[in-house]
Amino acid sequence: MSEAAWILSAGFAGMLLLGVPFAFALGIATLGALLASDIEVIALAQKMISGSQSFSLLAIPFFVLAGDLMTAGGLSRRLVAVANALVRHVTGGLGMVAVIAALFFAAISGSAPATTAAIGTIMIPEMEKRGYDRAFATALAVSAGIIGPLIPPSIPFVIWGVIAEESIARLFLSGLVPGILLAVGLMLVSWFYARRHAIPRESRATSREMAHAFWDGKWALGGPVIILGGIYGGIFTPTEAAVVGAFYALVVGMFVHREVKLADLPRITLGALRTTAIVMFIITAAAGFGWLVAFEQLPPKIASLLTEISDHNWLVLLTINALLLLIGAVMDNVAAMVILGGVLITAGNDLGMDPIHLGAMVTTNLTVGMATPPFGYALFVGAAVSKVGIWDISKAMGPMIAIMVLVLLAVTYIPMVSLALQSLL
């Protein structure tokens, strides 16, 4: 390898081991590699700016804002009430409420941290009151939170669609079945936990309580219908859907439920801007890094090494998944997508994979990383919400991570899991 390639790989890895933040490590490694080559440094600034100019990336701030407005406007609380009326009487019902509420919330926010925070804030104290261990309740909220990026709409699918130049609407559909499979698996974990610890069942919701929950939650339930119906009905693009979702959450929060005041908007908007700034800083730095990686011809070389591991495609895919799981556990999923995009796309082409299937596999894998110790983003959000230590949450997550891995294997080796709904388009 050239000197620049060594700086990009070994230099970047070394800075991560020293604890340098991802975005800074990416930028410094790229700058060092440029200084070691004959390329003008100004090219880095140009590539970083161009990497953030995609129209589709506008969906990110609006999906983040929609999630924050939903929480502030009481929509997430009403979604929990609907889920509670549906399944609270089943063994492990309260844990299932958290999972079903996450499914509803995910259909507007598209974000794992937002889903974890919204559901965890409400459900963790309630589960603890009913006899669930607080660490288990937090682990379940974190695991349910990663349904957010799988159920459409999804911020990670937007990012992968930009990187791979694939249809974002089709990528959205590819995550629906995996998201539902994960939800079913987590509900089974909740059932076994409640049965093992003899947690008493709640009373079944009466017809009156059921009707009240659905009536009170009709606006919250209407959000996913409008957003997803608009996307797949051809009324607006996924990016426009993010704007519609944020506007819908704003109108409902301010004028229907009246739980969002005008004075609250600067605080809510600033919070969404902070989250967006972190994501976009990583994307921008990773765009420059990814461009130089491609210039050094590293993707085809690495992809060739991966595909030559074995003549059996299933073993190559297993190796790729194992590497992605390790990377997802220590690296932000956005940075991993941008940095490894070229390698993964080349490897997928060599293996003859459908591009949408590849996108579903990569996104599912790196989404699992958001809940995986030691650096999962959703894991830290759960810890902040519950005030439970990362180690205690991680110990409680064993069965949930096993479910995540099973779903990942299903996505990887059964293409129809991610491609079954493509005929809708």
Image (cartoon, grey):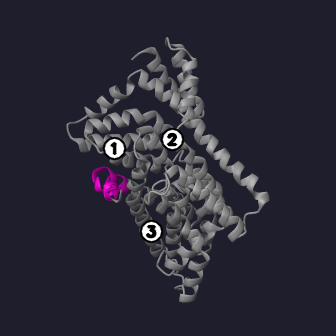
Is the N terminus in the top left, top right, bottom left or bottom right quadrant? top left
Q: Write down the region rendered in magenta.
A: 406-423
Q: Earlier in the sequence, mark 1 or mark 3?
A: 3
Q: Nearer the viewer, residue 162 or 235?
A: 235
Label 1 to label 3: alpha-carbon separation: 31 Å
Q: Which residue is mark 2?
A: 334
Q: Which residue is mark 3?
A: 187
Q: Residue furthest right?
A: 263
Q: Which residue is mark 1?
A: 355
Residue 64 place in picture, x, y as percent:
60, 52
Q: Is residue 92 left or right of residue 213?
A: left
Residue 71 place in picture, x, y as percent:
65, 62
Residue 392 is labelled as none
Within-10-Å neighbours for mark 3: few <14, some 14–19, many 20+ = many
- When the figure is inspected, residue 391 is found, relative to residue 50, above or below; the finding is below
> What's the residue type where badge 3 is placed?
Met
